[in-house]
Image (tube, rainbow, N blue to C red):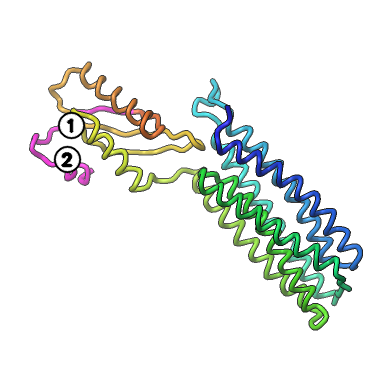
Amino acid sequence: MKNAKTQIGYLQAIISVIINILLFAVKLWAGIKSASIAIIADAWHTLSDSFSSFLLIIGFKISSKPADEKHPFGHGRAEIIFSVIVGTILAVIGVNFLVESIERLKSVHSAQFGLFAYIATIVSILAKEGMAQFAIRMGKKHNSYLLIADGWHHRSDAISSIIILIGIILGKYFWWIDGILGILMAFLLFYAAYDVLKNSISHLIGEEPSDDLICEIVELIRNKIAQPVYLHHLHVHYYGDHREVTFHIEMNPDLALKEVHTVMDEIENLLRVEMNIEATIHAEPYSLPDSENISEHDKSK
């Protein structure tokens, strides 16, 4: 059974493909009628979002596959890899808009915009921003880098349509307005690509666990495990929704090996049930007085 994040991902992708194809047809027709290179380019930009949506489907399909012999930690990182691809596409689109805008300034290009161009552009803005807000909100709710990246892709299309709308309104007064606003939009796309790639690549390479997560693990063990244990060298490894944690625990050296193993099993089961984390634990003896405060010992590590 698919989890909620995967279901939302599929729903977002299917809606994106349908709406993007419809918007492409409307904007392409508006661009042809008004002889506007900007609107025609924006139409193809919208169609490129369909490719991003197909990547969304593939990314969620792969990341939702269970663990197997070759991939014991599952396929969750596939989602991050595909979000890197989407971020790269954003950057490429930004480069294309930058080049297109500069060429437009060089050629002193102007277009004749009619009512249909206004309507098509406004509809595109509303539809794409609505899709962007839905994708980004769901991405944050379900901790999905791929959904957030796809949301930024939709927002980039909404921004491009806003710039074109401004160009339509002011174009009859300033022939160069489309080119200047196109350059501005290109840099906004570069920022969006940077934001998506920065988070995704950092997560893919590996990040230090947050202080909140460390405190949550330590407090859970303190409150639920009767035997005193001291944690240090804690590391967290992310595989999409699947998390693996490794750490050392120091325990009373007088305990029998069987007792130590029992405590380790209790900790592993506790983290699995309470936090959906798989733990690998290394046990070693401590040499501190029994009266030493546990928090002070943790800080010293």
- The residue depicted at 22 percent of the width and 16 percent of the height is 258
Seen in the picture, residue 249 relative to 168 is either above or below; the reply is above
Quadrant, the N terminus: top right
Q: Residue 103: percent from the left, percent from the top? A: 81, 70
Q: Is mark 2 on a helix, strand or loop?
A: helix
Residue 228: mark: 1
- The residue depicted at 57 percent of the width and 42 percent of the height is 80
2 or 1: tag closer to the N-terminus: 1
Name the residue beneath numbered marker 2: 294
**Which residues are the magenta region?**
281-301
The number of discs equals 2
Could you say which quadrant of the image residue 177 lies in? bottom right
Disc 1 residue type (three-letter): Pro
Q: What element carries label 1?
A: loop
Q: Look at the image and tell me whether residue 141 can be seen.
A: yes
Mark 2 and mark 1 residues within 8 Å of each other at the beta carbon: yes
Q: Residue 36: percent from the left, percent from the top? A: 86, 67
**Left or right of residue 72, residue 174 in this image:** right
